[in-house]
Amino acid sequence: QVQLVESGGGLAQAGDSVRLSCGTTGDTRNTYTMSWFRQAPGKEREFVAGIAWRGGNKRIADSVEGRFFVSRDGTSNNLYLRMNNLNPEDAAVYYCAATYTVVVTTDPRGYEYWGQGTQVTVSS
């Protein structure tokens, strides 16, 4: 099993950069895919970015391509999301998720483990 804890959210202004972190405990063998999702009020949870196990396949949502960058520490197995040039549409609760698969899936139903989420607020 994997326990996930997100951090790094908060209030930002449009154009700012923020880095989110996802710490892992429990199984840290780097044998699972990890991804970021986000959910804004009244909207469905949507995929943002993910990295497959052992740093393989990487996917980024079209809506954040070129602005958001996902990375993973192979030693600690922590997951990071660097968000640049934020805009108000990026405001949401950001969740870290993990699943024991070898490729990144964009469907949140494909993830067994979730963090509690971290709020990102962007003012214009």
Image (spheres, rainbow, N blue to C red):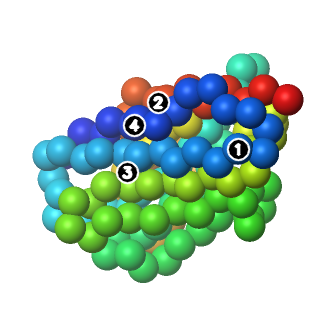
Which of 17/69 is in front? Answer: 17
Amino acid residing under circle 1: Asp
> Considering the image in quadrants, where does the N terminus appear?
top left
**Amino acid on which disc 4 is placed:** Glu
**C-alpha gap between disc 2 and disc 4:** 6 Å
Earlier sequence position, callout 2 versus callout 4? 4
Q: Position of residue 57 (x, y in %)?
A: 49, 77
Q: Nearer the viewer, residue 21 or 46?
A: 21
What amino acid is labelled 2 in the image? Gly
| Mark 1 or 4, closer to the camera | 1
Q: Do the residues labelled 3 and 2 touch (CB within 8 Å)?
A: no
Q: Tell me, for residue 98, which label it has, or none.
A: 3
Residue beneath label 1, please?
16
Q: Residue 79 in the image: x percent, y percent?
A: 39, 55
The residue carrying mark 2 is 117
Image vertical order of residue 60 relative to residue 22, above or below: below
What is the CA distance from the residue labelled 2 to the residue labelled 1? Answer: 20 Å
Which residue does the image show at 79% across and 55% down from the upper left? 63
Extreme right residue here?
Answer: 124
Query: Please, is residue 6 above or below residue 67 in the view?
Result: above
Instruction: Say which of marks 3 and 2 sits in front.
Output: 2
